[in-house]
Amino acid sequence: DVKVTQSSRYLVKRTGEKVFLECVQDMDHENMFWYRQDPGLGLRLIYFSYDVKMKEKGDIPEGYSVSREKKERFSLILESASTNQTSMYLCASSAVDSNQPQHFGDGTRLSIL
Amino acid sequence: QQPVQSPQAVILREGEDAVINCSSSKALYSVHWYRQKHGEAPVFLMILLKGGEQKGHEKISASFNEKKQQSSLYLTASQLSYSGTYFCGTLAPGNKLTFGGGTRVLVKP
């Protein structure tokens, strides 16, 4: 089974802090994704990576950046956390074909105070 | 632009049927369905490619009408384990998978 592991289930940070969310997958998948999940809004794509050091902006990239130095690891960075970034963050991975299923991690519930 | 899911929520008794709809304003390559149980990761159910095919997973099936850019998910003879939030994801040419707002399903004994 594919395993996508997110480093924290719950995280509390202060406004203005730099925040790192880590995600690791064990299936040698080319594609990795970061989503934000808010009630009624579903899953919104923040950033997408299709290869090491390659990234593309999703629908809501403002205030975020990403890093993919190794194939199995994809990091989401909040450069200067703000209260409106309080949310559930989900990481996913998939094989290169867009019609392959995405496999999700359990999510990180991030609170910015 | 996100696909629109309806209804937003549905409550069922065990054994009842329900339909969840997913509509897009764009021409689609495929529609993907996921289910997320409370406190858990979303789990892939099925992918429907253009061609109007139907697929099934347990007693959950789906159809895809590419001309109308719509997909429907059918929960037949619902079980308690079907409770959760269902998301459709649509894949259009030149785009990444885009998810709808979700439909919350509660199946009661």
Image (cartoon, rainbow, N blue to C red):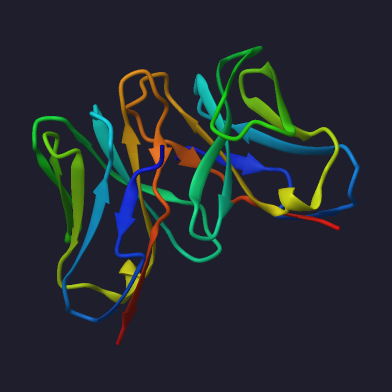
In this view of the protein, can residue A28 be seen by the observer? no
Judge by depth and name the residue closer to the eye, A9 or A14.
A14
- What residue is drawn where x is 34% and y is 29%? A100
**Residue at 54% across / 32% down in the picture?**
A59
Spot occupied by residue A28 in the image (x, y as percentages of width and height): 52, 22
Residue located 9% across and 38% down the image: B53
Q: Is residue A22 left or right of residue B90?
A: right
Give above or below for A107 relative to B19: above
Q: Residue furthest bottom?
A: B109
**B26 relative position to A32: left or right:** left
Q: Residue A60 location in percent, x, y? A: 60, 35
Residue A51 in view, yes or no: yes
**Picture residue at 26% right of the left edge, 74% below the top:** B79
Quadrant location, the C terminus of chain B: bottom left
Picture quarter with the N terminus of chain B:
top left
* Quarter of the rendering containing residue B30: top left
Which is more toward the observer, B29 or A22? B29
On the picture, is B57 further left or further right than A57?
left
Percent x, y for residue A83? 79, 53
Across and down, in percent, residue B46 comes to 26, 43
